[in-house]
Image (spheres, rainbow, N blue to C red):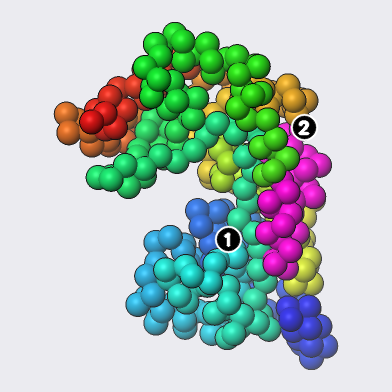
Amino acid sequence: MVDFFSKVNNFFYGNLSKNKQIKIVVIGNCQSRPIARCLSLLNSNIVITSIAVVHLLKSEQIDEYEKYFEEADYIVAQLVADDYHCEFVRTCELKKKYAFKLVSIVNLYYQGYNPELMYLRNTSQGTLKSPLGEYHNKTIVDSWKKSLSIEECLNLCNDFEYNQQMYSGIAEKSINELKNREKSADVLIADLIDKELVSRRLFFVFNHPSIWLIKEMCIRILEKLDIEIPHKNKTLNIPELLDKIIVPVNIYAKESLGLSFEDVYDFQGVGCKIDAKGDVTTYGQHRYTFEELVKKYYEIYDKALAS
């Protein structure tokens, strides 16, 4: 539907990017703000009128956002499931009302670099916070559950054969799942991830992509909409926006994928405190060696998970 709308609009008014402001609404997860930033930098006529961060929204906020949806020339929206708790950002609902100006995209996601990362939940806190924000290392979790020492845990984390046994096939599964999800989207991106993941780091953690990848996604969005891209081949003057947490690539993944980019050695995370009740609070930024990280995780699990 977007292609048809673009052709009709251009027939009557000429290319939008040459004649007037282009009002765009972006709907999605934590990637929505970087996407909005890149879109506006790729074409100075683009005005982002609203950014709807779906996990922060409730259905009763529809009046707050619907006016922007109505006024927008285009709505760029990540795919959202039909049963998502906030009804007005569901893809099915957006298609009903705005199909002629909606362009759907996937959530950029790749688990191949760090197949050991996961979320961990407990009954009192929901997603358990950690020195890596909301991310946990399955090898560390399993080691703690087995009452292994910190040294034994570190040995497993750095053991190629152990990681191969635990995480083999996850990289392939992850890219195939993305290809399958984007069958429902208007813009494809999995082919580029598959092509570039060896030569440049595309993700800091599995759902936090680099600004380079976000820019490439935005270029494809604008090409889909037939909007001019004056700055397509220029380096955008924008820092990384999703690099608060950076994790060294898994030892097995690094060799099996044949990665050629320079990796980090320490973990970039957040300061982390845990009280006697097991409540975890995070603050600022903090770098951890692997040993420091394991010690902090063990401290958290001893207080938050032991019962």
Report the disc number at residue 212: none
Instruction: Kindly state the secondary structure of the residue where label 2 is placed.
Output: loop
Quick one: quadrant of the C terminus? top left
Residue at 57%, 15% (x, y): give it.
Answer: 158
Image height of 142 relative to 74, above or below: above
* Residue 128 location (% of width, % of height): 34, 40
Res 300 seen here: no
Q: Can residue 30 be seen at all in this image of the molecule?
A: yes
| Residue occupying image coordinates x 55% and y 54% | 31
Q: Nearer the viewer, mark 2 or mark 1?
A: 2
- Residue 194 magenta-highlighted: yes
Q: Is residue 179 above or below residue 62?
A: above
Residue 36 is marked as 1
Quarter of the rendering containing residue 16: bottom right
Identify the residue at image location x=32%, y=47%.
Answer: 126
Q: Nearer the viewer, residue 155 or 202?
A: 155
